[in-house]
Image (cartoon, grey):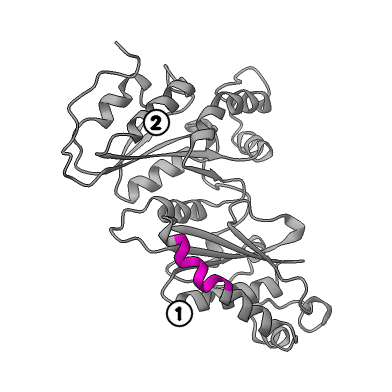
């Protein structure tokens, strides 16, 4: 018998393809969060599935979409064989199979394991980074064929759930969900950003003593930036670019887009532009979530900036808070 199982009778060819998400990736990168989030979206979750049962599971009749977790904990785990099985299942018209690969930087993975004081599953008697390196090499064939690679290095659980809802939501006619965030270049560009805009050319309110303690959500700072002779033209050109661009993303099947706007400190100019762009997008019917990375880290964000149920305070930096690597991976 093939290690991938025996062929079963396909599901009804006349029905809409069954959505199937296979979740794999690096231990500690947020696989538990992905499975739980997709289950909350309406998927039936099957975790730690033996590879020999993969084909049998997918070719059974199901009354709701599936999310399947297969990773290095699995007894017969074989990345090249799993990649081949997924590619085979992608060819079946009754299935819509997508592979989600969860990733994070070595530094973040090491910190998560250190904080939980648990060993890496592939390096029980070795330093954490040795286990990470071994697993990263082992999983490369799956990462190369993934439909979605989700880097959680700078994501909170709330950010991860928003991203997963945008990428794998089950709406019949899904809208493009846009996540707009401000950031500081001092702390790096958000890894998940699809589009990045630099507004450091605008006059900096930081050098005005009475404006320094305020943020881009405060009216005096907003009025100061509006007075910059280049502000109005830039915002007009930015929206003129995005206006025709976003519908094209929808036509190409993209349902989640992250726009990041950065300045030096991530407190004044980028915050104001992010808030303005989120407002502009919401007025045009887009599903928008607004956040401010540096304000969130400092506890300065206010719920008034939230859109579509999200709050700026939902997105603290530092990874998937609440994910315990050793409890699952």
Figure label count: 2
Residue 75 placement (x, y as % from top left): 42, 17
Left or right placement of residue 244 versus residue 170 in this view: right
Residue 328 placement (x, y as % from top left): 47, 32
Q: Which residues are magenta?
A: 241-249
Answer with mark 1 or mark 2, whichever residue precedes in sequence: 2
Residue 236 placement (x, y as % from top left): 61, 81
Which numbered mark, 1 or 2, is in the foreground of this view? Answer: 2
Question: Which one is nearer the viewer's eye here, 95 or 139?
Answer: 95
Q: Residue at horizontal 33%, vertical 31%?
A: 89
Residue 22 placement (x, y as % from top left): 39, 36
Picture quadrant where residue 5 is located: top left
Q: Estimate how packed mark 1 is, as few (under 14), some (14 to 19) or many (20 or more) residues with alpha carbons within 10 Å.
A: few
Q: Residue at horizontal 19%, vertical 31%?
A: 10
Residue at mark 1: 283
- Quadrant including the N terminus: top left
Q: Is residue 177 above or below residue 110?
A: below
Q: Residue at horizontal 42%, vertical 25%?
A: 84
Q: Is residue 206 above or below residue 55?
A: below
Q: Estimate how packed mark 2 is, as few (under 14), some (14 to 19) or many (20 or more) residues with alpha carbons within 10 Å.
A: some
The local secondary structure at tag 1 comes to helix
Question: Which one is nearer the viewer's eye here, 243 or 283?
Answer: 243
Picture quadrant where residue 93 is located: top left
Question: Which one is nearer the viewer's eye here, 301 or 199?
Answer: 199
Considering every residue shown, the one lying at the far top of the view is: 1
Left or right placement of residue 235 versus residue 252 in this view: right
Is 243 a magenta residue? yes
Residue 217, visible in the rendered structure: no
Q: Is residue 120 above or below residue 323?
A: above
Residue at mark 2: 87
């Amino acid at each position: 018998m093939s290690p991938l199982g025996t062929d079963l009778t396909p599901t009804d060819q006349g029905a809409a393809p069954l959505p199937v998400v296979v979740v794999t990736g690096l231990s500690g990168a947020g696989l538990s969060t992905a499975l739980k989030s997709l289950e909350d979206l309406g998927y039936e979750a099957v975790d730690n599935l033996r590879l020999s049962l993969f084909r049998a599971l997918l070719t059974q009749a199901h009354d709701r979409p599936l999310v399947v977790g297969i990773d290095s904990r699995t007894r017969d785990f074989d990345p090249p064989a799993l990649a081949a099985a997924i590619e085979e299942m992608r060819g079946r018209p009754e299935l819509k199979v997508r592979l989600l690969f969860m990733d994070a930087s070595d530094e973040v993975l090491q910190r998560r394991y250190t904080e939980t004081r648990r060993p890496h599953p592939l390096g029980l008697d070795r330093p954490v980074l040795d286990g990470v390196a071994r697993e990263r090499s082992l999983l490369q064939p799956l990462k190369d064929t993934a439909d979605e690679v989700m880097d959680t290095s700078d994501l909170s659980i709330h950010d991860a759930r928003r991203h997963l809802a945008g990428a794998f939501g089950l709406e019949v006619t899904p809208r493009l969900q846009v996540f707009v965030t401000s950031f500081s270049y001092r702390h790096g560009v958000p890894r998940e950003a699809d589009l990045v805009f630099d507004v450091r050319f605008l006059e900096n309110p930081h050098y005005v003593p009475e404006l320094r303690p305020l943020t881009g959500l405060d009216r005096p700072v907003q009025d100061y930036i509006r007075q910059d002779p280049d502000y109005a033209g830039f915002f007009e050109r930015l929206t003129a670019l995005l206006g025709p661009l976003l519908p094209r993303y929808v036509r190409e099947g993209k349902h989640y887009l992250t726009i990041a706007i950065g300045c030096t400190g991530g407190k004044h100019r980028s915050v104001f532009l992010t808030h303005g762009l989120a407002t502009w997008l919401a007025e045009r019917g887009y599903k928008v979530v607004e956040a401010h990375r540096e304000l969130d880290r400092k506890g300065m964000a206010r719920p008034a900036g939230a859109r579509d149920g999200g709050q700026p305070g939902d997105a603290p930096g530092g990874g998937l808070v609440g994910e315990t690597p050793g409890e699952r991976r």
